[in-house]
Amino acid sequence: MSVYIPVELQRKIRARFTECCAYCRTAEYLTVSTFEFEHIIPLSVGGETIFENLCLSCPTCNRYKAYRQTAIDADTQQEICLFHPQQQLWSEHFAWNEDATEIIPLTSVGRVTISALKMNRPQLIRVRRMWVKLGEHPPNIP
Ligand SMILES: [Zn+2]
């Protein structure tokens, strides 16, 4: 669903996420995509178009997340909430591996989110390898 997001709100969200995908942390300027404003709690279940419920997302993470808020953890078979970019810190749930090509989960939230959003998809790992060589990755975000 497409919804109008005021330009000033778009600017605030872009700044909040340092022009990077709130999930896979891809920097928008390294891609040919226009990143999207993702409703963390979907509109279809009452999520609002407000700063606290929006994040910047690359189109691929946005497609995989879609309307979901939870996913089944393959390790425990439990239903776990996906990472909430406005309420949780990325660095508490995720880390980069040694060569910064893959995202490692630090928690069950990290684990289900990486899996559900396919944050280590092979194409992304390949392109991250090139960005590392160019000195453009990983992004320097707290
Ligand atoms: Zn992404």
Image (spheres, rainbow, N blue to C red):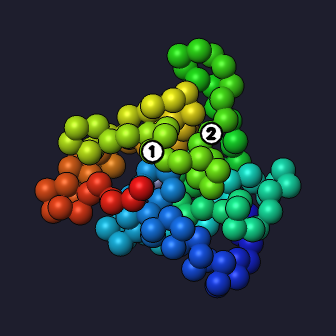
Identify the element where label 1 is drawn. helix
Q: Quadrant of residue 137?
A: bottom left
Q: Is mark 2 within 8 Å of ligand 1?
A: no
56 relative to 127 in the view: left or right: right
Image location (x, y in percent) of residue 142: 42, 56
Residue linked to disc 1: 91
Image location (x, y in percent) of residue 115: 50, 34
Task: Quote the CA–CA distance across marks 1 and 2.
Answer: 15 Å
* Residue occupying the point 52% across, 43% down: 117
In this rendering, the answer to whether 42 lies above or below 51 is above
Residue flagged by tag 2: what amino acid is it?
Leu
Res. 99 mark: none
User: Observer-nearest residue: 58 or 90?
Assistant: 90
110 relative to 41 in the view: left or right: left
Query: Counting other residues with Cα less than 10 Å from the Cα at mark 1, is it few (<14), some (14-19), or many (20 or more)?
Result: few
| Front disc: 1 or 2 | 1
Instruction: Answer with mark 1 or mark 2, whichever residue precedes in sequence.
Output: 2
Image location (x, y in percent) of residue 26: 39, 58
Query: Counting other residues with Cα less than 10 Å from the Cα at mark 2, is it few (<14), some (14-19), or many (20 or more)?
Result: many
* Residue occupying the point 44% across, 39% down: 94
103 relative to 107 in the view: left or right: left
* Residue occupying the point 53% across, 16% down: 75
Res. 82 mark: 2
Q: Quadrant of residue 98?
A: top left
Q: Is residue 121 visible?
A: yes
The residue positioned farthest toward the right in the image shown: 46
Image location (x, y in percent) of residue 2: 71, 69
